[in-house]
Image (spheres, grey):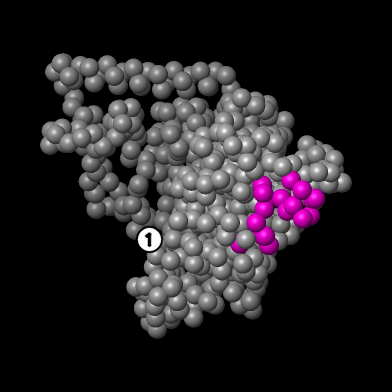
């Protein structure tokens, strides 16, 4: 179904072997360029000493203390051991508590999960299930209202008490610039469009669902990003998962960061391309895979790869780290590959005017072949976009499943995006958007600095509004979430399998809507809970990402 040669034409002016043009370099074999470019030595130096950066890039990860790591493994081991022991005792009718087994009416069904997944869900996840999926009944702004619920069967089911917990400080939503609101210019504009266009379109863009508002949005997005053209989609997840298969296919190679989002992973798997994983934000790892791909070509046949596509994110939503984009672009140019940049969390949240990680580093948008992002975070709406050269966007309009088969964006949602984006660009006649971008940056630095001063281990870049606070031990995941809610602070806690087994964490998301008083209140409560649960593990021994050990044996081809 896919036609990779046409995708190649969309990504560049002409099809290439390994992304290299034979005309430009005088002949290729397995992507080897005769006569290396004069800039190779310079790029090698840049990649290893960070000389490409026009601004300080402060990103470090404090190593897990050995005792904490051991106790975390022991904690999971004890939970697992007792889980299997109790399952054995239930089978022999010795254990009276039957809450961790499937219901009687489910036993005649073929198991929906694998054995260990079923075991993990019943014996570990259920113990702390109450810390997730809490329903809110208000706008997800700086504060939210949470519906109270209780469980009488060890979190298998919940009952609502009818009480609403008012004014919970929201430290979990991706409302980076504060546009998720039910009043103001965005709400008024969306309400006006709702009265004219209605709530839904009931058709795809290729049929009867192409509104003038969609055309206006795409032109605005292209102008905002500084690219030739852009296309909007109704779902951020599908923007990745349905467009990557349209760009690469069999005979192509995808190089993916090990911490890429599930939507990128799914899109890569659906494409049929070979996938190889490089260590998170590790340029030596990426360059090694690029070299191997150029030298060895495809497995068995040794033919050149039709295309090599690098998949990275602007801000990684679990680590709080920012992609080393200048180095990635340098490697992409050196080895003539393509770059797909997911700016779901960075667009609006980084850069002096909120134009994302490309502006943050002062780079040229033309150096990124595929610029992807979502409207679900900084713009307080829904959907996603892809920007790039006109040839690329025209190709996706006819070959992307998300464009051909999916229903168009809802008109009020489109207007929310347009209004908020114009506000960020200053085209509404005010400086409110620019002030929101600056306020988010100030809140981010303040919050990160205070947490580090308290003695918590914090991951990520100092400019990232995603702030992971390390919890490590499984029992502390649920305890932290519950204690914070008792203190009227709403947080997101994350554990295995969403993170490595010894790196459970709480993830805070900062917003321009947070006032200093709100942040100080949250910090005060976090400090108290940190003392209560003994979470202040920091020894202030930070390891810069460039200096972290590199193990070549950890990079394997995951799929042919």
Instruction: Give the magenta range.
Output: 10-28
Location of the N terminus (image quadrant): bottom left
Asked whether, in this view, residue 131 is left or right of residue 550, the answer is left
Question: Residue 301, image x and y in percent?
Answer: 59, 37
Q: Is residue 166 visible?
A: yes
Q: Residues within 10 Å of mark 1 (few under 14, many from 20)?
A: some
Asked whether, in this view, residue 116 is left or right of residue 430, the answer is left
Q: Is residue 291 magenta?
A: no
* Quadrant of residue 454 within the rendered picture: top right
Q: Is residue 21 magenta?
A: yes
| Numbered disc total | 1
Q: Main secondary structure of the magenta part?
A: loop
Residue at left offset 62%, top offset 49%? 307
Asked whether, in this view, residue 225 is left or right of residue 518, the answer is right
Residue at left offset 72%, top offset 30%? 547
Label 1 secondary element: loop
The foreground one among 120 and 306 is 306
Question: Residue 444, image x and y in percent?
Answer: 62, 50
Question: Residue 247, image x and y in percent?
Answer: 55, 55
* Quadrant of residue 82 within the rendered picture: top left
Question: Residue 214, image x and y in percent?
Answer: 49, 75
Residue at left offset 77%, top offset 55%? 23
The foreground one among 491 and 191 is 191
**Position above or below: 422 against 81:** below
Q: Is residue 463 visible?
A: no
Q: Residue furthest right?
A: 38
Q: Which residue is tagged 1?
A: 138
Asked whether, in this view, residue 475 is left or right of residue 312, the answer is left
The foreground one among 402 and 36 is 36
Residue at left offset 40%, top offset 65%? 406
């Amino acid at each position: 179904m896919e036609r990779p040669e046409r995708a190649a034409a969309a990504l560049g002016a002409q099809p290439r072997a390994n992304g290299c043009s034979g005309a430009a370099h005088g002949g290729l074999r397995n992507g080897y360029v005769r006569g290396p470019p004069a800039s190779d030595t310079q790029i090698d130096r840049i990649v290893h000493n960070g000389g490409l950066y026009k601004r300080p890039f402060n990103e470090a990860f404090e190593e897990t203390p050995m005792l904490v790591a051991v106790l975390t493994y022991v904690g999971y081991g004890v939970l697992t051991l007792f889980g299997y022991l109790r399952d054995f005792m239930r089978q022999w009718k010795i254990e009276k508590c039957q809450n961790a087994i499937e219901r009687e009416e489910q036993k005649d069904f073929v198991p929906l999960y694998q054995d260990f997944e079923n075991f993990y869900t019943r014996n570990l996840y259920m113990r702390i299930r109450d810390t997730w999926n809490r329903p809110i009944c208000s706008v997800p702004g700086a504060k939210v209202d949470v519906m109270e619920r209780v469980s009488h069967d060890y979190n298998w089911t919940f009952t609502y008490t009818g009480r609403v917990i008012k004014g919970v400080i929201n430290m979990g939503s991706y409302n980076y610039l504060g546009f998720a609101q039910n009043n103001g210019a965005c709400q008024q504009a969306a309400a006006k469009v709702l009265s004219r266009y209605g709530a839904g379109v009931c058709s795809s863009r290729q049929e009867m669902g192409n509104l003038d508002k969609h055309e206006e949005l795409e032109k605005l997005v292209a102008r905002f990003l500084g690219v030739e053209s852009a296309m909007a989609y109704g779902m951020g997840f599908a923007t990745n998962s349905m467009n990557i298969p349209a760009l690469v296919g069999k005979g192509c190679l995808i190089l993916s960061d090990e911490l890429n989002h599930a939507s990128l992973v799914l899109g890569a798997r659906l494409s049929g391309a070979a996938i190889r994983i490089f260590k998170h934000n590790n340029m030596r790892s990426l360059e090694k895979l690029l070299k191997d791909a150029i030298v060895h070509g495809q497995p068995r046949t040794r033919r050149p790869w039709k295309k090599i596509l690098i998949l990275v994110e602007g801000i990684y939503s679990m680590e709080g780290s920012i992609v080393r984009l200048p180095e990635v672009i340098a490697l992409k140019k050196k080895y003539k590959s393509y770059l797909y940049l997911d700016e779901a969390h960075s667009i609006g949240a980084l850069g002096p005017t909120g134009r994302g990680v490309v502006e943050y580093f002062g780079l040229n948008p033309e150096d990124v072949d595929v610029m992807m992002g979502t409207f679900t975070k900084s713009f307080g709406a829904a959907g996603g976009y892809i920007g790039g050269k006109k040839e690329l966007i025209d190709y996706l309009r006819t070959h992307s499943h998300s464009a051909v088969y999916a229903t168009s964006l809802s008109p009020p949602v489109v207007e929310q995006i347009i209004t908020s984006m114009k506000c960020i660009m200053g085209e509404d006649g005010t400086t409110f958007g620019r002030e929101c971008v600056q306020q988010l940056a100030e809140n981010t630095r303040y919050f990160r600095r205070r947490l580090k001063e308290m003695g918590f281990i914090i991951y990520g870049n100092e400019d990232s509004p995603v702030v992971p606070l390390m919890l490590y031990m499984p029992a502390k995941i649920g305890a932290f979430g519950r204690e914070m809610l008792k203190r009227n602070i709403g947080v997101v806690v994350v554990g295995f399998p969403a993170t490595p087994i010894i790196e459970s964490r709480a993830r805070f998301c900062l917003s321009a809507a947070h006032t200093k008083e709100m942040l100080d209140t949250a910090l005060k409560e976090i400090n108290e809970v940190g003392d209560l649960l003994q979470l202040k593990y920091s020894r202030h021994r930070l390891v810069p990402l460039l200096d972290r050990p590199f193990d070549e044996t950890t990079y394997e081809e995951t799929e042919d």
